[in-house]
Image: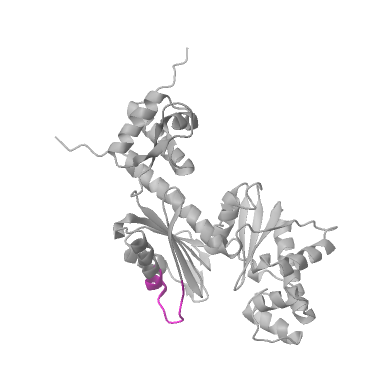
Amino acid sequence: MSRPLAGPQGLLRTLNGRAILEALARSGPQTRAELMSTTGLSRTAVTQVLRMLEGAGAVAAAGVDRETRGPAAGRVALHPRLGFAAAVHIDHHAAHVVLVDASGTVRAEQHAALTSTEDRVAHIVDLVDRCRRAVKATKDAVHLAVVGVPGIVTPDGGIRDDLGPDGGAFRAALATALDCPVRIENDVNLAALAELTAGAGGDLASFALLLLDDGLGAGIVVDGALHRGFSGVAGEVMYLPQPPLPIGAPIVSDAVVRDLALNEGCDPDAALADHLEAAARGDAASARVVEEIGRRIVLVAGSVGLVLDPEAFILSGRAAHPALVAAIERIAEEYAAQLPLRFLVSSFGPEAPLVGAVGEAASALRGTLFTRILTPAAKPGR
């Protein structure tokens, strides 16, 4: 005869406590009856766990529910002073920083251009401090940071970009300056995570996000999980071979746009954004520049499609501009008989990397705080 499942009371309290904390983080303030419905716990279990969480300073009263029938019931919520995580997106031009709480709510936000001589670490720390002052939080109220950067990010948090590998120096310096753990992530991968959790990729088992900014990068999701590759190189599609381009030549970059503009008699100093707007207005020369960029992106998608066969490609950054989307779809139709390719437009536009950083930061913050709250303090030795 098999024995019924059983476990120590401490483990059950921990599991029940995490279920209630997750429910409050996901759905906001709730009554005891709502928590019973959400978690499946009994009234006694909910009452006991809430008493424990209140004693730990993890939850607090959050008003009264007067909308449902019967006597008014008190609501509880995560304590507003549990702390924050910093979500950061920094590129070659600017940094964007937000503070989020455990529910994923943005509590403060700062954005500022980055000068050519400014230290990236000092710039981020200054923006975090501005956010912290806006919510009147102490320095130790920021428990961790998730930072999206351009370039290859290795599993140990090192960055390899135009300046070569940094050996983790940026992550280490930022962690020291912020006095909290720092996670570095490729910005295109964060954009893909944003689409996976709350955007156009939510209903797809696999997709490749193609983000066009200073260059072209891909975030690859396979079977519902982000694929970074063994050394973080997965998704570096800007250098895929495309005859007649020489091997190793960038498919899209500022220099490429300049050369294409010269060939079409356009202003060589115009940025890609300018050509996209001009093409949308009907300028024929800029439209040819956009058409060539669209052709290159379709060939990248075709190369990825032949290897991974994703359900769709999500166009992000400047690739989501209507003029470029139209060119990509038109060119893809020419190849449809040989290789059907499905294209979707990002749900978040240029903010996708920051949206991904916010989601990852909030998730990491919940893990950190809930583990700390639910881990019993060590008993003093006798």
Q: Residue furthest left?
A: 382
Note whether residue 317 is visible: yes
Q: Nearer the viewer, residue 18 or 2?
A: 18
Q: Is residue 200 above or below residue 270?
A: above
Q: Is residue 331 above or below residue 69?
A: below
Q: Is residue 250 magenta?
A: no
Residue sitting at x 48%, y 53%:
360
- Which region shows up in magenta? 112-124
Q: Position of residue 107 (x, y in %)?
A: 42, 56
Q: Is residue 191 above or below residue 264?
A: above
Picture quarter with the C terminus:
top left
Residue sitting at x 44%, y 34%:
66
**Residue 362 shown left or right of residue 187 in the figure:** left
Q: Quadrant of residue 247?
A: bottom right
Q: Nearer the viewer, residue 176 or 137?
A: 137
Q: Is residue 28 above or below residue 32?
A: below
Note whether residue 227 is visible: no
Q: Position of residue 33 (x, y in %)?
A: 44, 29
Residue sitting at x 40%, y 22%:
6
Q: Position of residue 375 (x, y in %)?
A: 32, 39
Residue sitting at x 57%, y 60%:
352
The tally of labels here is: 0
Q: Nearer the viewer, residue 22 or 150?
A: 22
